[in-house]
Amino acid sequence: MFYSPKEGWSQDALGATQVSRLRETLKQAAKSPFYHARLAEAGVSPETIRSPEDIRRLPLTTKDDLRSAYPMGMCSVPSRELIRLHASSGTTGTPTAILYTKNDIQNWASLMARSLYAAGVRPEDVFQNTSGYGLFTGGLGIHYGAEMLGCLTIPAGSGNTKRQLKLIRDFQVSVVHIIPSYALYMGSVLVQEGIDPRELPISRAVIGAEPHTEAVRSKVESLLGLKAFNSYGLSEMNGPGVAFECEEQNGMHVWEDAFVAEILNPETLEPVDEGEIGELVMTTLTREGMPLVRYRTRDLTRFIPGRCPCGRTHRRIDRIKGRADDMLIIKGVNIYPMQIEQVLMNIREVGQNYVIEIFQDREMDQMRIKVEIRDEYFVEDMRALQALQRRIASLLRNEILITPKVELVQHNSLPQTQGKAQRVVRLD
Amino acid sequence: MFYSPKEGWSQDALGATQVSRLRETLKQAAKSPFYHARLAEAGVSPETIRSPEDIRRLPLTTKDDLRSAYPMGMCSVPSRELIRLHASSGTTGTPTAILYTKNDIQNWASLMARSLYAAGVRPEDVFQNTSGYGLFTGGLGIHYGAEMLGCLTIPAGSGNTKRQLKLIRDFQVSVVHIIPSYALYMGSVLVQEGIDPRELPISRAVIGAEPHTEAVRSKVESLLGLKAFNSYGLSEMNGPGVAFECEEQNGMHVWEDAFVAEILNPETLEPVDEGEIGELVMTTLTREGMPLVRYRTRDLTRFIPGRCPCGRTHRRIDRIKGRADDMLIIKGVNIYPMQIEQVLMNIREVGQNYVIEIFQDREMDQMRIKVEIRDEYFVEDMRALQALQRRIASLLRNEILITPKVELVQHNSLPQTQGKAQRVVRLD
């Protein structure tokens, strides 16, 4: 039923495993120059941990810490024991790098295989990975997992939609790994070329890597004619395979035998109340090459209360609500771009593309939202359009508490993207 | 001493292994629709093979056969047993695809690890792979081998020379996998930026994937301050890891426990005499997913006579002399572009870039060679330049038997390339 029996472990068993692995992790982390100093400074040691809750007594780790420890300051093994490095693109400032031993790669692949299995992928599936390969973890990370599960794995890489579609058809691809904005783009190509998605052999998509709403998932599902499963990962926690949706499609199980997940108020750094949104903070439990303790992901989410009908005991996180850093402050109000997307995608007349423009006016940030309207609603009647514009602005005000400027534009008039969609543009 | 004891097997042991594995291969191949028909038509079966020489009684396989069997016509296992697909870019015409089982991937990685070890790479090395990842076999193929060997493997991917150099320095990279034209480009970047190659930690490069001369190897070695080892592979025979140079740097050992290599006259299809140049024809000996029998590689090379001082018994092939298809016929003479490169790279005044232009004149193909001259030799004295031009033309005539038009151009005036160098340009 599960890929690993660990997925059904009791909370007690998971808690006990977390305690012993946390202690191991602290011992291992202390072998790196960075944590040797950081843990001593905080006065903590493996003995600090007696229950899973004791993790709160450990110091936090930030992206800036990762940058300052670059290249090898967080490495906990002699470098001859490392077999892999992944790095951020590092186009601006100091890059970050994650280092893996052979066991780390093996454990990652096995978590990834477990994740795909939870989303319904089986060894007999043909699996196409449309992530870019190389230093980015989405390529090799997903690849090793699909291969370990036993799928015929096609390392298609990113872009070249015509070739992606040719491979899907020629090799009867049943599952694709694809980011939501590229899935929407592929869907628009199908529409342009008059291809009925039901002609395609794909029945499942694993999506993730960029925050998106339930409405975007529904669009991906209907445009491509498949079921789409959300996923969560970040290179600091290996890469993909940290939390995955099961067949219930209602939240992503965090693999709690491999990670401790906390959700903290990003201001007070205290745990939020059950079910409340906060910043996800994660600790590796099995990593040898580069353990990370209470890493602040900057991703906003919440634990979904209750147990999942699928039987897996590992807690679920909700879809990512945005980045703690993405928060916009407009007229003194905190706004997350994801809130805007959520409203727009529930309005029937709205197409699949929009952009939030931030500009300065009277020395204050102002917001203008350009929204693509479906062809059938983009009528000549100016009054009808103005009414639609007012309705959208009013629905947005209900969610974000201020009335934004809304501009309606024609279908396909905003720049399409093959990579991560850039939804917020700052005009200076 | 060797990665695998098989590398030192006697000719008898290798021959006996080839016979039994050839029989297995024929049995396995006959499970595919393509070979089922092709082998029956040729009236051959496993019993046809009683000695390694009996391979000549088997039918040949061509690139066109691969295309016609696309996508699954040469697949010898139920598709649920496949775990990997690699494909040609297929920008023109039907693509080709190679299918691998789990054992195929394991065997490939192990041949690749053996190859790197033969070229002096060790588990404690830090290995940077500058091949593009994805459907191309140079990325994942080299990667799996380096990782199996135990190197810290950096999946840098292609391009972005600044980042390549940053990774090399930050992680004390000791070995790079790099194609010769990109190595020359990287060398020119070092010169431009005033970086002394001896400052860099790299001491070894694995080169290959495009035919090049001994002079190009020497240039790569001096520009980057390292030892460069030639390699041979093609996706039809897994990818990289088919034949590799050892520390002797004198020819590439073909792993004869995994492949049968023949060298045939491309016209008569009979074996050439020992040491003569001909077309390399190869047969897989361990492949399950898609065995290939006597595949015509179109690559021109020869067996290097005699035994290698390194002690490996597997025969060596010489560096690739060009493609059977690349042959130019100018004024009735057969010319391989590699002959021209070989002459040019031995002329002190010649820089690292040149291009062979083919154009029509009086309904015949004509050839013009544009050659970059190093700055210090590109003098104002027209007579000196004309003398150099005549000398180059005369040296070329000695090799290719006709006197080509030679045009001298300034350093850096020909288009530089980060990918495979296109040395022959057809002007229409």
Image: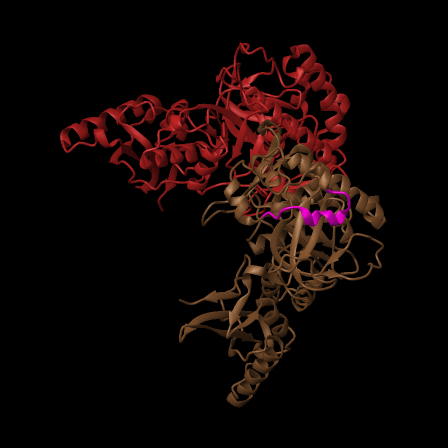
Chain colours: A red, B brown
Q: Hey, which residue is sitting farthest bottom in the picture?
A: B383
Q: Is residue B260 above or below residue A229?
A: below
Residue occupying image coordinates x 84% and y 48%: B12
A409 vs A395: above or below: below
Q: Residue at (60%, 62%) from the top-left corner?
A: B322
- Between A51 and B138, which is closer to the camera in this rendering? B138
> Measured along the vertical axis of the image, is residue A352 above or below residue B237?
above
In the picture provided, is A392 more to the left or to the right than A118? left
In magenta stretch: residue A134: no
Q: How many marks?
A: 0
| Residue stretch in magenta | B49-61
Asked whether the viewer can see residue A92, the reply is no
Query: Which residue is at the front of the view, B359 or A93?
Result: B359
Asked if residue B56 lies in the magenta stretch, the reply is: yes
Residue A337 placement, left or right of A350: right
Residue A277 percent across, percent down from the top left: 49, 21
